[in-house]
């Protein structure tokens, strides 16, 4: 084999490798889009895809579930909205807005659920926001009740561009809208849980109120029977009788 023939063969091999890699990436992207197109067997109401189509979030038609795909998730995973602990919108690494389950975040903090590489509890970023004419990263983060993979990030932009450019404005608006949709669902889940807990409290109080109280005479009769059967000694009988009539 001549040098020219080897070079041609090498170029062809590289071209074939690049082609197969592109095809595999395209199939993976198509699979991810398909996995997000339906949630619980129904067409998704809202879908957010990353800029490279390798991660995404979908909201179910009945607004009771979210589907996470890509990123740390090998397969798409569906979570009940009650399992979504929080949602955040990051612009250039700073949290612009966040929402968290008020009824669950305390437990998550106690359990040591630290978010991000700097040990921040969800929604914990604070400080002054920078005013910059450029923007280089925009992403939406969702936190779910899963100790193996609690975080799901969907990067929407990962290159520097003017903050006033049509592209940046469109992406920021899309991210804000999707976060707002998650915000509504998380707050609805919070409200539903509070109402369910309140209803359980009412039912428990009602059950206690409906239990007939035993009269002192009934209690004394039971103590006498226990004394007669020998299950209580005279001293035990007298002590319990004194407490009952006190």
Image (spheres, rainbow, N blue to C red):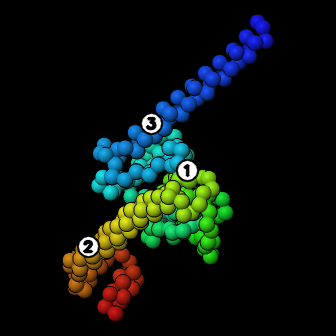
For the C terminus, the quadrant is: bottom left
Residue furthest to the top: 1
Image quadrant in which you'd find residue 80: bottom left
Residue at left offset 22%, top offset 84%: 215
- Can residue 169 be seen here? The reply is yes
Disc number lying in front (2 or 1): 1
Mark 2 or 1, nearer chain start: 1
Residue 82, percent from left and from top: 39, 60
Q: Is residue 188 left or right of residue 145?
A: left
Q: Which residue is mark 1?
A: 148
Residue furthest to the right: 3
Q: Which residue is mark 2?
A: 203
In the depicted structure, whether residue 141 falls above or below residue 130: above
Q: Is residue 82 left or right of residue 202?
A: right
Question: Is 108 or 14 nearer to us in this picture?
Answer: 14
Q: Which residue is mark 3?
A: 31
Between marks 2 and 1, how big is the CA–CA gap?
36 Å
Question: Is 137 or 66 nearer to us in this picture?
Answer: 137
Residue 216, percent from left and from top: 25, 86
Disc number lying in front (3 or 2): 3
Residue 139, percent from left and from top: 54, 57
For the N terminus, the quadrant is: top right
Q: Is residue 13 left or right of residue 233?
A: right
Question: Is 46 or 238 nearer to us in this picture?
Answer: 46
Between marks 3 and 2, how big is the CA–CA gap?
48 Å
In the depicted structure, whether residue 229 falls above or below residue 30: below
- Can residue 141 be seen here? The reply is no
Residue at left offset 35%, top offset 67%: 188
Between marks 3 and 1, how big is the CA–CA gap?
23 Å
């Amino acid at each position: 084999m001549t040098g020219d023939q080897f070079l041609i063969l090498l170029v062809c091999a590289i071209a074939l490798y690049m082609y197969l890699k592109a095809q595999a990436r395209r199939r993976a992207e198509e699979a991810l889009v398909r996995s997000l197109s339906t949630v619980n067997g129904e067409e998704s109401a809202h879908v957010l895809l990353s800029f490279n189509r390798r991660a995404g979030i979908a909201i179910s038609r009945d607004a009771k579930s979210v589907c996470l795909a890509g990123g740390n998730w090998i397969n798409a995973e569906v979570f009940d909205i009650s399992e979504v602990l929080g949602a955040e919108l990051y612009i250039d690494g700073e949290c612009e807005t966040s929402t968290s389950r008020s009824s669950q975040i305390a437990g998550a903090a106690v359990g040591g659920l630290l978010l991000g590489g700097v040990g921040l509890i969800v929604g914990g970023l604070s400080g002054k926001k920078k005013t910059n004419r450029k923007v280089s990263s925009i992403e939406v983060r969702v936190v779910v009740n899963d100790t193996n993979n609690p975080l799901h990030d969907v990067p929407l932009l990962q290159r520097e561009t003017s903050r006033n450019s049509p592209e940046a404005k469109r992406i920021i608006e899309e991210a804000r809208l999707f976060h707002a949709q998650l915000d509504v669902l998380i707050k609805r889940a919070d409200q539903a849980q509070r109402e369910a807990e309140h209803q359980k409290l009412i039912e428990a109080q009602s059950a206690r109120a409906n239990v007939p109280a035993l009269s002192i005479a009934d209690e004394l009769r039971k103590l006498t029977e226990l004394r007669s059967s020998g299950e209580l000694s005279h001293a035990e009988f007298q002590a319990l009788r004194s407490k009952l009539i006190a």
